Amino acid sequence: MGALLRTHFRLLLAGVLTFLCMGVGLAIYGPALPAFSRQMDLSLSNVSWLVSTHWVGNAFGVVLSYLIGAKITPRMGLSALAIGSAMIAMPFTPLQPFAGAFVFGAGYGLSTVIFNPRVLKAFQTYGTAMLSFLNACFGLGAIAAPLIFLALGSDPGLAFGGIAIAAAALWVLGGHSDAPTQAAETAVVQDQTFRPRFGLLGLNVAGIGLEASLVGLGPAALIQLGVTEASAAQLLSGFFVVFLGGRIGVMLIAHLIPPFTMYLLSALAACLACIGAAFVHPGVFFVAAGLPAGLFFPSFFVSATREMGDHPRVAPLIVASSCVGGILVPMALSNLLPDLQGQAFFALLAGLAGTAALAGLFARSRIASLRA
């Protein structure tokens, strides 16, 4: 393991810092929605489209990565992250924050496709654990984000302006060679097998749709249930503390539990947590939902890679399914949010998670590799 860390240190460091930046940016949307609503003079339902616009941009970044393949570099993702957050921070027109969310989302998508498969391949037998560590760093940034937002006076401009500066600094410090990408490409010979499983990808749509809705719309649903804006931001920070704990925990038990089994357990836990948020205590169970939400992507990514092969198109296809979930589920719930009054919001998410768990059991009974 020590030799692998020395060989691929630049790859891992670049991924860690980029994912920290991504985590901060994504976690700001939720607590900032009421402030955006006031500043832009739009209803909460309309301004909630910022979340879906982010995921549309994410999808664009994934499609772009599919088209240009090996030409993608970490700096491309950082450029989009910096420009997009700057557009959100300094709006000159009411539509500019939405355009900024699209560009920021594109950087998010590019960076996800750049780093996840390369870290998984570069660290070989330790790939699952290091993939979880990389995505845990995303959670670390997301934990700090709501608290930083409150410290900045709940000002979205200052928050996203800071993200733009951080991403620009990473771009400058990244050097001219973009060597982390090249190092990972030469680490392992690629298996060109490509077995797309679109039914299986539907499980990722459900998992990421649930995660995106909890992060982006959960605070607004909590406010509808009587939680103050400040408390909702603090609860979101708690959500990401548990989110991060889950991803760190995966590093310790990845060799004990098959990744698809972990996905199924996460879906069941998310269902129970959302039921608790709807009918028992919204704050406590919203925070608890961070644990399964943090496990959806790494457990599914490893499972799907094993089933679908190691072709360069596999990672963009998996991340594309994440985009579909991140776009469609929050989009549907954004339109319903004013009428759901919080409780029904969490009940609907519980139904989505329960359906994913049942569908996953059916998929495992049909696909042998998912039982391994």
Image (cartoon, grey):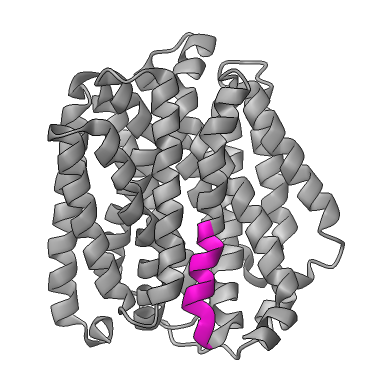
Residue at 29 percent across and 69 percent down: it is 262
- The spot of residue 153 in percent (x, y) is 60, 17
Residue at 52 percent across and 82 percent down: it is 126
Q: Nearer the viewer, residue 204 or 28?
A: 28
Q: Nearer the viewer, residue 348 or 253?
A: 253
Residue bounds of the magenta highlight:
125-136
Which quadrant holds the N terminus?
bottom right
- The spot of residue 266 in percent (x, y) is 26, 60
- The spot of residue 363 in percent (x, y) is 18, 73
Q: Main secondary structure of the magenta part?
A: helix
Q: Can the viewer see residue 72?
A: no
Residue 132 magenta-highlighted: yes
Vertical arrangement, residue 335 with respect to residue 185, above or below: above
Residue 75 magenta-highlighted: no
Residue at 28 percent across and 66 percent down: it is 263
- The spot of residue 198 in percent (x, y) is 29, 68
Q: Quadrant of residue 116?
A: bottom right
